Image (spheres, grey):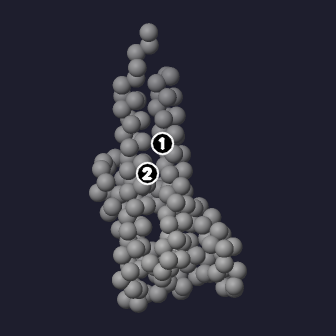
Amino acid sequence: MASKQNQEESKRSVFLKSLFCGAAGAFIWGIISSIAYFFSFSEVSHGSFILRSFFSGSWTEGITGELISLAIITVLGVLPALVYYLLMKNLHGVMPGIMFGIGLWVLVFIIMNPMFYYVPTFYDLSSDTIVTTICQFVLYGVFVGYTISYEHHDRRIVANHPQKEA
């Protein structure tokens, strides 16, 4: 009975850590995206394009807009982590995270692009923006994917091989 309860707590723990990992990754890579935008490596900042696509005004372009955008992107970062947890947590290594990051990039910059009028179409993006944003999404995917897979694998090993009580 105690073993089943421990397994349930372990699953819940991995799930909550996965959600936190997605938010933390989105926060970290949102900051990196803003820095890349500031130094003109990219035409778009991940967080601010979400805000600027739905709201207009000078406040969206200053530090206030960047901070609000960072908060939005941090909250939204939970969604990809949830998808990774549900569909890909059993996969090991870096490649699933790389593929996940590329898939997210395609989703945001190609499939969902019409939703974000602030972002130029794929054909209008500069090569610097494409390379920079793909790299950022890949790094986010690896961060989230590797963390979730490692945590899931680690908890599974602990659940299958409990320490003997003395």
Task: Classify 136 as above or below 148.
Answer: below
Q: Decide: marks 2, 1 in contact (CB < 8 A)? A: yes
Residue 66 or 157: which is nearer the viewer? 66
**Residue that mark 2 sits on:** 85
**Residue that mark 1 sits on:** 14
Q: What residue is at 54 percent from the left and 50 percent from the top? A: 20
Q: Position of residue 164 (x, y in %)?
A: 40, 15
Please tell me in which quadrant of the rendered image residue 34 appears. bottom right
Q: Position of residue 96 (x, y in %)?
A: 32, 57
Tag of residue 90? none
Q: What secondary structure is found at the residue carrying circle 1?
A: helix
Q: Amino acid at mark 2?
A: Tyr
Q: Position of residue 70 (x, y in %)?
A: 60, 67
Q: What residue is at 44 percent from the left and 9 percent from the top? A: 166
Q: What residue is at 59 percent from the left and 61 percent from the top? A: 75
Residue 136 or 2: which is nearer the viewer? 136
* Mark pair 2, 1: CA separation: 9 Å
**Left or right side of 15 for 56:** right
